[in-house]
Amino acid sequence: MKKTHEDFLKQAIALAEKGMDEGAGGPFGAVIVKDNEIIAEAYNRVTSTKDPTAHAEVVAIRKACEKLNDFQLDGCILYTSCEPCPMCLGAIYWARPDEVYYALDRDDAAEIGFDDQFIYDEIEKDMGSRRIKFVKMAREEGLHVFQKWQQKANRIEY
């Protein structure tokens, strides 16, 4: 029987609860589907792995890409229990799934202490005005590597 978007989203929500109950991290879960089959699922593992990038969406993307042996998720749909944070949003755009479905939004997350608005605000600021100091230096050395990449005949575009 073909599963619906709601079925897959409910699975992401169930994973969020499972991860939270197991003490893995915050209440977030994600499922990635291709051809109506789950190819990866994950829940937030930030605190259990001591990895600030171990959000449910990122962990699921890593698993799906490994399973597909590809760095893109063409033909895939991502289901997540909450609107992706800025980091996850970036990962999603780089992974390029076809669609994303989510249950809760950033306002719901902010109400329970997961407020990412400061990151959205930081992105809009110039480098010198951000909370964390950013220093640009060694441009020529860095530029050399970029130029080498640009000339690389067998590079894989992404």
Image (tube, rainbow, N blue to C red):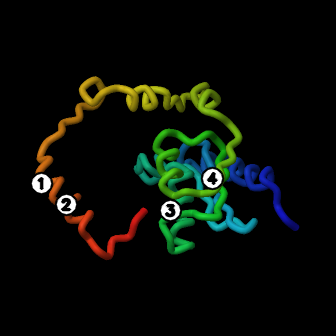
Q: Nearer the viewer, residue 23 or 87?
A: 87
Report the residue marked by disc 4.
30
Q: Residue at x 12, y 54 (%)?
A: 141
Of label 3 and label 4, which has the lower sequence position? 4
| Number of residues whose C-alpha sits closer than 10 Å to that of mark 3, classed few (under 14), some (14–19) or many (20 or more) | some
Q: Measured along the vertical axis of the image, is residue 105 above or below residue 155? A: above
**Residue 14: % across, % down:** 71, 50
Give whichever of discs 1 and 3 has the lower sequence position.
3
Q: Image check: 69 left or right of 97?
A: left
Asked if marks 4 and 2 touch (Cβ < 8 Å), the reply is: no
Relative to residue 84, is residue 91 drawn left or right? left
Q: Position of residue 106 (x, y in %)?
A: 59, 32
Instruction: Count neighbours of disc 4 (C-alpha within 10 A) and say few if under 14, some if 14 to 19, many if 20 or more.
Output: many
For discs 1 and 3, the disc positioned in front in the rendered view = 1
SS of the residue under disc 4: strand
Instruction: Determine if residue 45 is in view.
Output: no
Judge from the rendering whether residue 47 lies leftward or rightward of residue 26; answer left or right: left
Q: Could you say where residue 35 lies in the image, as x and y percent from the top left?
A: 72, 68
The residue that mark 3 highlights is: 62
Q: CA distance from mark 1 to mark 3?
A: 31 Å
Name the side, left or right, on which 110 lies relative to 146.
right
Residue position marked by numbered label 1 in the rendering: 141
- Whether label 1 touches label 2, CB < 8 Å: yes
CA neighbours of label 2 inside 10 A, class few (<14), some (14 to 19), many (20+) = few
